[in-house]
Amino acid sequence: MKNALHTHTELLGLIGHPIKHTFSPMMHNVASQLLDADYLYLPFDISPAELKEGISGLKALGFKGFNVTVPHKEAIFPFLDAVSEEAVVIGAVNCVVNNSGALQGYNTDAFGVQYALDPFREEITGSPVMIFGAGGASRAAVYALIRHYRPSVIHIVNRTVQRAEQIAHHFKQQMHYEGIETSESAPFDTDAIMRGCKLIINTTSLGMTPLTTDSPVSSSEGFTRDQIVFDMVYNPVKTQFLRFAEEKDAVTIEGIKMLVAQGAKSFELWTGKQMPVAEIYDTLLKYLNP
Ligand code: ATR
């Protein structure tokens, strides 16, 4: 095994708070071993108050790159030397490359969304879409949708409607897209609008282990057999949301697809190497479906 912590081992990592249930270390360390490459990926729980010191620490230790997760995806901007076009438009960074001390921010979530949706490009393009959630993951989805599939309308449904309204305003300014409509998830009845949408995406954490009976919808009523339904929650692989969709014979896309794709893009940015995605997918699947 090459990953035996030689002096030339390249360090990669993840910063977030909290970062209890992450599969990223497994994904990147297994990929590195499969490629016989010398990288080590470590998770770091860094609170918002420690963000500045945390980033300085990673730079001082010569980390080649790191992922960024909640709650630092927006707060990290002032510490970066350059930010990619998609990360600027999305307003969130989830991947940083350290180019000899110069930090460059990217958003690989948007690539993950596109990877998951691209097999359905023709059906999605120009169609109405519904998104549950209005956080960073939702912004990445909205960006990928507008950029690649130009939906006729994007309905954003969120518990806190103001966050959905902020996204509508943001993308009107950033991408001149005026098709975002917003609703509060409760007591708003989403079923009728949902039935008119071609694509439904869950970007909230509802349904994630251990609260696996949770879902952004309480029944299968809003789903139809003509729909494509994508859940960004990847643990469990088959969420309650996707089970409801399957009850109506909708096509479903599991969150693990996006997880691996965004990870593969980060890995490529740091190492210049292609992640062996099929093997990583199988490794994760075995772990999530023992
Ligand atoms: P991410 O970067 O993964 O999108 P985030 O920015 O914290 O993370 O956003 C989490 C999303 O899940 C939000 O849409 C959040 O709703 P609020 O904006 O109202 O907070 C949603 N979410 C999380 N827990 C939820 C719950 N128990 N019920 C409903 N929505 C929830």
Image: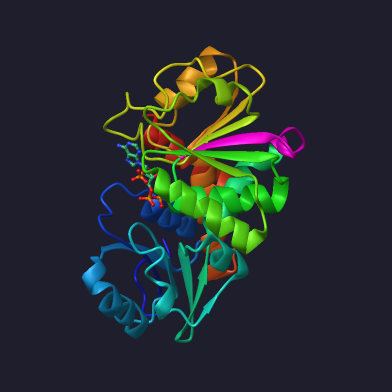
The residue nearer to you, when weighing 168 against 259, is: 168
Quadrant in which the N terminus appears: bottom left
Percent x, y for residue 135? 42, 50
Percent x, y for residue 54? 28, 75
Whether residue 134 appears in magenta in the rendering, the answer is no
Quadrant in which the C terminus appears: top left
In screen coordinates, is 64 left or right of 148?
left
Can residue 1 be seen here? The reply is: yes
Whether residue 129 appears in magenta in the rendering, the answer is yes
59 over 252 or under it: above or below: below
Name the colouring of the figure.
rainbow
The quadrant of the rendered image in which ligand 1 is seen is: top left
Q: Quadrant of residue 47?
A: bottom left
The residue nearer to you, when weighing 27 against 236, is: 236
135 over 244 or under it: above or below: below
Q: What is the count of numbered marks? A: 0
Residue at 42% in and 50% down? 163
Report the magenta residues as a range: 120-132
The residue nearer to you, when weighing 167 against 5, is: 167
The residue nearer to you, when weighing 236 against 12, is: 236
Q: Quadrant of residue 53?
A: bottom left
The residue sitting at the right extreme is 122
Percent x, y for residue 15? 33, 64
In screen coordinates, is 98 left or right of 199?
left
132 over 134 or under it: above or below: above
Can residue 264 be seen here? The reply is: no
In screen coordinates, is 279 left or right of 198?
left
Residue at 65% in and 45% down? 179
Residue at 67% in and 20% down? 226
